[in-house]
Image (cartoon, grey):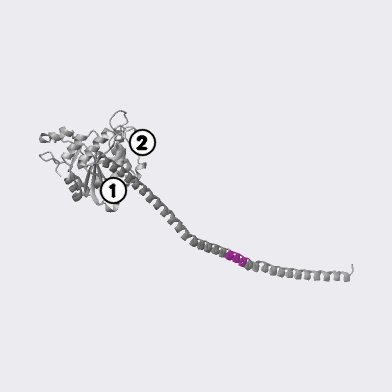
């Protein structure tokens, strides 16, 4: 190889090296340029695009919430109207039930009045009281003396002691607001000899309230329920009392006791007890449904003894309104206590209403009362020398 060819090769090598350096520098610059555009420019666009999408979503959510609020505002008055209509319907049904119950009670009272009219008894005052509720006067208490067909001597003993007769009884009703009546139903055979005897007795004294009820020892719970329902329909009183016909009562003591509780709602007052539930058949006070009170040997819930107890008007009205669904147990005092279980009732235990016969209470000049009626119990009684109950 000659010198000229070697020079040409050297020159080409130098030139190619320069071009390579320039090409590398150009490639580096181009790479930097494109790299900056890829990292700087797209990022704001992506951010702007994301922000716009989120804003659009937020706008849609806001519009949706706004539309829902408007819909709720539009539906709310309609909901109120529906609730109001349902409430009015419920009240109307309750009023209708009470009206039906009152009509049934008026029918029962009318039947009782019809029976008394047939017997010629003086029942005009009771009929006048039941004609219109607007003309009723307010009484302090209505005393219903539970009696039976065979208890004529007991009734006569009560008439001779603590139950005024004739004009005195009318004066007691008008001035003291105290109604007293013997309470009895009908015999198994309507219009039989037992009914005729009671009708003749009522014609003489006019102090018997006849119930639409068939008498029987095992029917005392039903009789008690019908008595309260009938009494609350006939007389508007603060208290309604049930007392047995073998109990002599001091009316003044009883009245003073009740007046102290006159302003209280739902009053149930008496000699409260909690006796054992008897499951043995054939014994007195046997409870056929003893299994409802728990295990054998359990006691009853607290309730007033059946000799004498009083309930306020709202409780008597409750019995009248719900008499068709109130369950009857074998013992009427247990039944009454059971009807008030679950209600907000003021149970008042007054030991003065615990009836008993202290030793020697009926002696000497008072022997005639004991022998005539076999009176066994006294409630808050002070006897005078003549044997009469001091009222």
Query: For residue 36, which quarter of the picture?
Result: bottom right
Badge 1 marks a residue whose secondary structure is helix
Q: Looking at the figure, which quarter contains the C terminus?
A: top left
Depth check: give the residue in front, 290 or 368: 368
Depth check: give the residue in front, 47 or 72: 72
Q: Position of residue 108 (x, y in %)?
A: 32, 43
Q: Is residue 251 visible?
A: yes
Badge 2 marks a residue whose secondary structure is helix
Q: Position of residue 214 (x, y in %)?
A: 31, 36
Mark 1 lies on residue:
130
The part of the chain drawn in magenta is 46-56
Mark 2 lies on residue:
292
- In the orientation shown, which residue stands out farthest toward the top? 282
Residue 296 vertical position relative to residue 10 in the rendered view, above or below: above
Q: In this view, does 380 lie to the left or right of 190?
A: left
Q: Is residue 334 visible?
A: no
Local packing at callout 2 (Cα closer than 10 Å; few below 14, some 14-19, many 20+) is: few
């Amino acid at each position: 190889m000659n010198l000229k060819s070697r020079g040409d090769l050297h020159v080409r090598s130098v030139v190619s090296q320069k071009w390579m350096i320039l090409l590398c520098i150009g490639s580096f610059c181009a790479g930097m340029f494109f790299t900056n555009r890829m990292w700087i420019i797209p990022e704001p666009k992506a951010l702007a695009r994301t922000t716009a999408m989120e804003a659009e979503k937020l706008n849609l959510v806001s519009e949706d919430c706004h539309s829902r609020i408007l819909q709720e505002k539009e539906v709310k008055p309609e909901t109120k109207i529906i609730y109001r209509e349902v409430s009015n319907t419920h009240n109307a049904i309750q009023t209708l039930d009470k009206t039906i119950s009152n009509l049934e009670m008026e029918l029962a009272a009318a039947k009782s009045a019809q029976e008394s009219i047939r017997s010629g008894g003086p029942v005009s005052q009771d009929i006048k009281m039941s004609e219109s509720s607007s003309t009723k006067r307010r009484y302090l208490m209505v005393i219903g003396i539970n009696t039976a067909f065979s208890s004529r001597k007991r009734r006569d003993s009560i008439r001779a002691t603590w139950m005024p007769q004739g004009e005195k009884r009318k004066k007691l009703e008008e001035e003291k607001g105290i109604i007293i009546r013997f309470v009895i139903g009908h015999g198994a055979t309507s219009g039989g000899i037992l009914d005729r005897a009671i009708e003749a007795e009522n014609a003489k004294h006019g102090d018997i309230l006849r119930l639409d009820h068939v008498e029987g020892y095992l029917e005392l719970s039903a009789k008690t329920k019908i008595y309260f329902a009938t009494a609350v329909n006939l007389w508007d009183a603060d208290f309604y009392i049930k007392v047995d016909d073998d109990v002599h009562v001091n009316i003044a003591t009883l009245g003073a006791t009740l007046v102290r509780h006159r302003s209280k709602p739902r009053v149930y007052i008496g000699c409260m007890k909690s006796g054992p539930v008897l499951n043995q058949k054939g014994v007195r006070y046997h409870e056929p449904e003893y299994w409802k009170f728990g295990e054998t040997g359990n006691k009853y819930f607290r309730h007033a003894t059946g000799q004498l107890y009083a309930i306020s008007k709202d409780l008597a009205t409750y019995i009248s309104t719900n008499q068709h669904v109130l369950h009857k147990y074998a013992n009427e005092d247990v039944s009454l206590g059971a009807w008030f279980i679950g209600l907000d009732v003021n149970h008042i235990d007054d030991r003065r209403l615990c009836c008993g016969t202290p030793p020697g209470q009926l002696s000497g000049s008072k022997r005639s009362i004991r022998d005539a009626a076999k009176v066994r119990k006294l409630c808050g009684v002070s006897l005078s020398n003549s044997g009469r109950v001091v009222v």
